[in-house]
Image: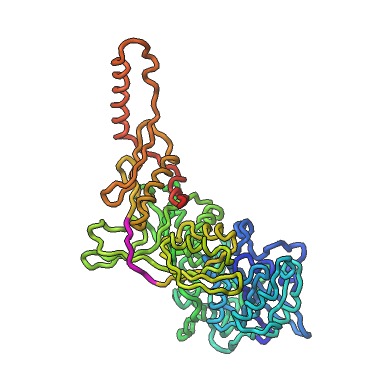
Amino acid sequence: MENIRNFCIIAHIDHGKSTLADRLLEFTQTVDSREMTNQLLDNMDLERERGITIKSHAIQMSHKFEKSFYTLNLIDTPGHVDFSYEVSRSIASCEGALLVVDASQGIQAQTISNLYLALEQGLEIIPILNKIDLPGAMIEEVSDQVIDLIGCKKEEILHVSAKDGIGIEDLLIEIINKIPPPLGDDNKPLQAMIFDSVYNSFRGIEVLFRVFNGKIKKGDKVKFVNTGKEYNVDEIGILKLKKESKNEIRSGNVGYLISGIKNAKEVKVGDTITHNENDTVEAIKGFEDVKPMVFAGIYPVDSSDYEELRNSLEKLQLNDASLVWEPETSAALGFGFRCGFLGMLHMDIIQERLEREFDMSVITTVPSVEFNCFKTNGELANIYAPSEMPEPNEISKIEEPVISAQIITKSDFIGGIIKLCIDRRGTLVNQVYLSKDRVELSFTLPLSEIVFDFYDKLKSISRGYASLDYELSGFSESKMSKLDIMLNGDRVDALSAIVHRDKAYNWGKKLCEKLKELLPRQMFEIAIQASIGNKIIARETVRALRKNVTAKCYGGDITRKRKLLEKQKKGKKRMRQVGNVEIPQNAFLAVLKIDE
């Protein structure tokens, strides 16, 4: 155990985590040069296309230093705020963390929040300046920021270029010297924590775990403490680029376990594994329970795919434990699921993964957040979707979730960012200059206002320089109301939204205009109306397709033409009563595309 080092890499999005992981794998010769590709651990097509890490990946390396071989277990982490759950579980499995900061951009919001997670767990931090070979690298300035943040000495900060492989050897020596070996006892009862799981259609569920105490052997009988289920260990092994089976894994190490588990619900990330005869073993306190921020309905395009969608969500939940869902029904879309996500990017990624990995065509409804609704009879209702909102006369007050947000940006963009936040009903709490041209702005904002396109707008105002980090700070009373959309008098529940009273008219008007462009014209007139309760606040009309019935009527009295037009009018009226409005899929996404 003296020669084991477990560590993770934490950094803001796009600061070079995946490239640094590539260089470490290359330098320790874990991967053959023929198999080497960029972003090697990001094995999802989506991750490579978008240049982001979505899943935390684990891999074991071996490095010789001073005549001894050291086992280095790297658990890579994502950098985006929506995947902070992945970061928290990687940190729970490690003793040390590499804090990577881009020398040309400096410390960003997500760097700080991930660092605090690591410090709370008592991890040893190794500060690293990456991209030192760039012409825009501000080595002295960014070094000062790192010293202010973690209170290290200037000579402790490693200068690295992950792309060119500069400083990688020094980094490996620093990992071996600075990060403490894991604590644990091989002779104690088995105690291992599940930090990830993957569905394999041939072998069942592969469980990834870190052993804290004891040892696990092939053929052992093990028990999962939270679910109480018992299994035979068919195969265990370590995580190289390809899995390598072993006969035994001892305390302090990281590995995988296969025991033919077929049911996705039997594996919970964060659960403790022990031997089946040990009833007294305590469950390990792992990472925090995740609280979804954004809720949206996911429905199959073809309602007969409902069961298939359920199975796909179960398999996806194995791989992404931060996804929560429960069944729901909609009058417009039939049977589907109400899903909870950590943010809009998380929702976007889940939808894309369902389509790519499971070949499911899905419709996603308008995202919403959780509201507390106090009724006049004293009841408290939690509202996750507009359809759950009671009638206006039954509501005493509504509370909406409020977040505290930290935005770090260049000082040139302060004006635009403050205006954006105030337009979204935000309040400026604090403004701190981190250096002469970098500012940290603290705001309190309603969560419902940042759900849609706040992050995109923030990036465009700051030309990509601003970084956002937020956490839920509580609930506050607000004037929220349910905005309904009606087509020919029928409410379409999938297009409803819960909006602030002051913005309802504007929102309703824009949505009606957008739907007018998107709905195909029918043989009858379609009235698109936005209403709050029984009050109509906006209306647009999609004109009917008309045949020129007067074409064959030439000359003669005007009454002949009028008679034909009246006859057509009656037919259109009758058709409107029996006609069905077909809503195209992109109309459900119209709400997301409304420009403020």
Which residue sits at x=32%, y=67%? 477
Of 350 and 438, nearer the camera is 438
Q: Magenta region, mostly helix, strand or loop?
A: strand
Of 123 and 472, nearer the camera is 472
- The vertical placement of 294 against 144, above or below, is above
Which residue sits at x=47%, y=61%? 419
Tell me the colour scheme of the image.
rainbow
In this rendering, the count of numbered labels is 0
Left or right: 489 in relation to 596: left
Q: Give the range drawn in magenta.
A: 474-481
Left or right: 329 in relation to 592: left
Which corner quadrant of the image does residue 378 belong to?
bottom left
Quarter that holds the N terminus: bottom right
Residue 516 can be seen, yes or no? yes
Which residue sits at x=48%, y=73%? 430
Decide whether residue 399 is among the magenta residues: no
Which corner quadrant of the image does residue 102 belong to?
bottom right
Which residue sits at x=54%, y=83%? 190
Of 536 and 413, nearer the camera is 413
Residue 305 can be seen, yes or no? no
Residue 299, how many percent across, how many down? Answer: 43, 52
Furthest residue toward top = 556
Left or right: 492 in relation to 260: left
Residue 17, how many percent across, how many down? Answer: 65, 69
Residue 143, how many percent across, how many down? Answer: 67, 77
Residue 197, how many percent across, how many down? Answer: 54, 68
- The vertical placement of 360 against 426, above or below, is above
Decide whether residue 480 is among the magenta residues: yes
Furthest residue toward left = 377
